[in-house]
Image (tube, rainbow, N blue to C red):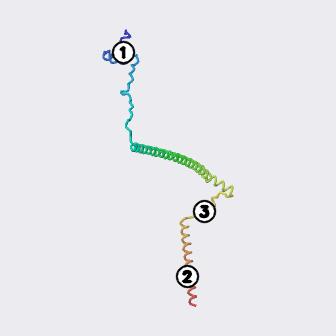
Amino acid sequence: MTNTNDFRGYTGYGSSNYLIDSFDVTRGSHAPKLRPQEEPSQPLKLRQNKKLKSKSVLRKEERISVAKAIKVAAVAVLCLGMICMVLHSMALKNELTKEISAKQTAIANAQSDYISLQSQLNSAVSMKTIDKVAVEKLGMTKMNSNQIQYMDVDEFVAAQKKAAEKEKAEAEKKAHQKTDQKSAKSNK
């Protein structure tokens, strides 16, 4: 049986060093003491300047203070100008971004229109549609097998060559007759 004041059961090892280290004597249940307020080391003293400055020294100090005021004003105007330029560039960037998004929306709409028109074209060019228009509107009929003629390509090419040679021969014959007629006229 352990007593409430006996901490040996909670240490795990039962060493006295562990028990001593586990208690923090600096922590307690009472509030910490208030530190006294630090007082200024020396009170402020005001001294009156008993030496009078000459007019030239006063003018010189006045010029220096005016020059400093002008410098401060110039820096303030420069900072204000830079802020205005940054705001203008941000506004311009915002405007261009809106234009870009509007153009992208227009491109997306045009692409969807293109796709729908392409599908309409594909359906209009299908063989079913072509057959239907040919039969119903143009009054055409489908071809029968006895209407089909087959041609031999070699025979067609040979016939084309013969026709070209025949035309060439006729052209030479006409040219030869014209030269004969001219020579006959010149002999008369």
Q: Residue at x 38, y 25 (%)?
A: 39
Q: Quadrant of the N terminus?
A: top left
Residue 22 location (% of width, % of height) = 34, 18
Looking at the image, residue 30 sits to the left or right of residue 118; the answer is left
Q: Nearer the viewer, mark 3 or mark 2?
A: 2
Q: Amino acid at mark 1?
A: Tyr
Q: Residues within 10 Å of mark 3 (few under 14, many from 20)?
A: few
Task: Assess whether mark 2 and mark 1 are in contact (beta carbons under 8 angstroms).
Answer: no
Q: Amino acid at mark 2?
A: His
Identify the residue under disc 3. 149
Residue 15 location (% of width, % of height) = 31, 15
Kindly state the secondary structure of the residue where label 2 is placed. Answer: helix
Task: Pick whichever, 23 or 36, lies toward us.
Answer: 36
Task: Pick whichever, 76 or 23, lies toward us.
Answer: 76
Q: Residue at x 53, y 66 (%)?
A: 154
Identify the residue under disc 1. 10
Q: Amino acid at mark 3?
A: Gln
Q: Residue at x 47, y 45 (%)?
A: 77
Sooner in the amino-acid sequence: mark 3 or mark 2? 3
In three-dimensional space, the C-alpha distance between marks 1 and 2, rounded to whole angstroms, equals 137 Å
In three-dimensional space, the C-alpha distance between marks 3 and 2, rounded to whole angstroms, equals 41 Å
Sooner in the amino-acid sequence: mark 3 or mark 1? 1
In three-dimensional space, the C-alpha distance between marks 3 and 1, rounded to whole angstroms, equals 112 Å
Identify the residue under disc 2. 176
Task: Assess whether mark 2 and mark 3 are in contact (beta carbons under 8 angstroms).
Answer: no
Q: In which quarter of the view is residue 21 placed?
A: top left
Q: Quadrant of the C terminus?
A: bottom right
